[in-house]
Image (cartoon, helix red, strand yellow):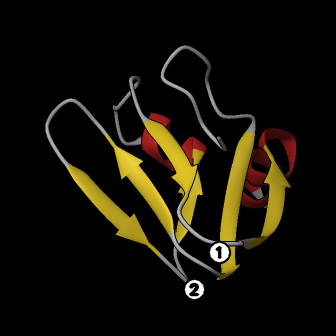
């Protein structure tokens, strides 16, 4: 499990390969190569998101501090 509804994601994750299932109370959808997720869902106002790998997955991670630094320049 990459993100659990009981814990805030610690950063952003870029999916390089594989498929992830994103589940919210309202919907479920898959994310694959090129998608960014993790803290993005929290920034989008969703705080009860669960993300699980459906296949083997390769990710690139950016911490919350890196994300915030990129936002402020």
Q: x, y (%) of residue 34?
A: 56, 85
What residue is drawn where x is 53% and y is 73%? 19
The quadrant in which residue 45 appears is top left
Q: Quadrant of the N terminus?
A: top right
Q: Which residue is mark 2?
A: 33
Mark 1: few/some/many CA within 10 Å (<14, 14-19, 20+): many
- Secondary structure type for disc 1: strand
Mark 1 and mark 2 in contact (Cβ < 8 Å)?
yes
Q: In the figure, is residue 16 to the left or right of 26? A: right
Q: Nearer the viewer, residue 65 or 11?
A: 11
Using the image, determine if residue 48 lies above or below residue 73.
Answer: above
Residue farthest toward the top in the current orientation of the protein: 6
Question: Whole-Å distance between the Cαs marked 2 and 1?
Answer: 5 Å
Q: x, y (%) of residue 50?
A: 46, 36
What residue is drawn where x is 73% and y is 44%? 11
Using the image, determine if residue 42 lies above or below residue 21.
Answer: above
The quadrant in which residue 73 appears is bottom right
- Secondary structure type for disc 2: loop
Looking at the rendered structure, which numbered label has been put on residue 41?
A: none
What residue is drawn where x is 53% and y is 63%? 54
Mark 2: few/some/many CA within 10 Å (<14, 14-19, 20+): some
Q: How many marks?
A: 2
Q: x, y (%) of residue 38?
A: 59, 47
| Mark closer to the chain start, 2 or 1 | 1
Q: In the figure, is residue 19 to the left or right of 57? A: left
Q: Which residue is mark 1?
A: 15
Residue farthest toward the left in the current orientation of the protein: 26
């Amino acid at each position: 499990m990459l993100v659990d509804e009981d814990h805030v994601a610690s950063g952003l994750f870029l999916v390089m390969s594989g498929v992830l299932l994103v589940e919210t109370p309202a919907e479920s959808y898959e994310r694959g190569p090129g998608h960014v997720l993790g803290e993005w869902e929290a920034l989008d106002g969703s705080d009860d998101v669960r993300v699980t790998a459906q296949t083997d997955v390769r990710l690139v991670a950016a911490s919350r501090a890196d994300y915030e630094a990129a936002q402020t320049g």
